[in-house]
Amino acid sequence: MNDCKTELEGEFALVRVSGEVDLSWSQSVRKAILDALAKARAVGVELSGVSYIDSSGIAALVEGFQNARGKGQKFSLVAASQPVRAVLQLARLDRVFPMVDSVEAARA
Amino acid sequence: MSARALLKLEMPAQAEALKPMRDALIAALRRAGVAAPEQDRLVLAVHEAACNVIRHAYGNSGEGRIRLTLTRQRGYLRFALRDFAPPVDPKRVKPRDLGECRPGGLGINFIDDTMDRWCLRPIKRRAGNILVMCRRPRTEGAAANSGGAGCGNADGEQVA
């Protein structure tokens, strides 16, 4: 089931995404990430529960990353699932995004 | 050359129709004996092609239809995606430089990286376009290449 929730803890926001991120709702993911960046200095996007992602979902992550970088904010992908990693690799973005294995690492 | 369809599907050109299309496609690829990692790549490529039809050919109007036909020809899997939208200029549909880190425009790269060959053609006399994508599956026992699957005259349509 597709879901996107944001947890705000002080200056850190965690956007938890799960399900199949495709054109039908990737705009909701994009909005959640940009909203989180407006509220917190550091944002992690937790992707362990994402079983599928398309180019529109990747675009939402890229936009978040660029937005954060432009404002000097910390942005990372947390526990990206194998399907997400495979598509990032295909887009040659696997070495562009900061990727961490845990929420603690994203918060640090 | 005609070939028995492994999948024939017609769907509305709407984002909500993508998930059922992926499910049907992955089931057809599984039945065809395509290995799991390759199934994922192929499904992503066809999904991206359908997204482009929805977003660009039909301009996200929510109207129009898409027809997907999967066949096996001379050892190649051949995916034909037919729309009924205004003609698209094939010269404008090409992969972008992946060295640029920017959102959007990755779909054609996914198709280009996954498929052995692909071509997009407007359909002569009748409205629409057809995108034909061919890939020889990397499975044991795949038929030898005897010239490859053609990209023209897909589904009996006369292409410009």
Image: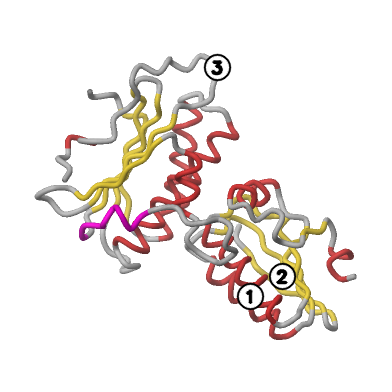
Whole-percent x, y for residue B83 in the image: 26, 52
Q: CA distance from mark 2 to mark 3?
A: 42 Å
Which residue is painted at 56% across and 64% down in the image?
A59
Do residues under tags 2 and 3 come within 8 Å of each other at their CB atoms?
no
Chain of the residue under the numbered disc 3 shown in the image: B
Q: Is residue B148 visible?
A: yes
Question: What residue did someone put label 3 on?
Answer: B140
Chain of the residue under the numbered disc 1 shown in the image: A
Say what secondary structure mark 3 lies in.
loop
Residue B110 is inside the magenta segment = no
Whole-percent x, y for residue B79 in the image: 36, 37
Q: Main secondary structure of the magenta part?
A: loop
> Residue A58 appears in which quarter of the rendering?
bottom right
Q: Is residue B9 visible?
A: no
A92 lies above or below B140: below
Residue A41, numbered circle: none
- Left or right: A102, with B41 as reference point: right
Question: What residue did someone put label 2 on?
Answer: A15
Say what secondary structure mark 2 lies in.
strand
Q: Nearer the viewer, residue B26 or B85?
A: B85
The answer as to whether the residues below labels 3 and 1 share one chain is no
What segment carries the magenta color? B86-93
Classify 10 Å Cα crowding around label 1: few (below 14), some (14-19), many (20 and above): many
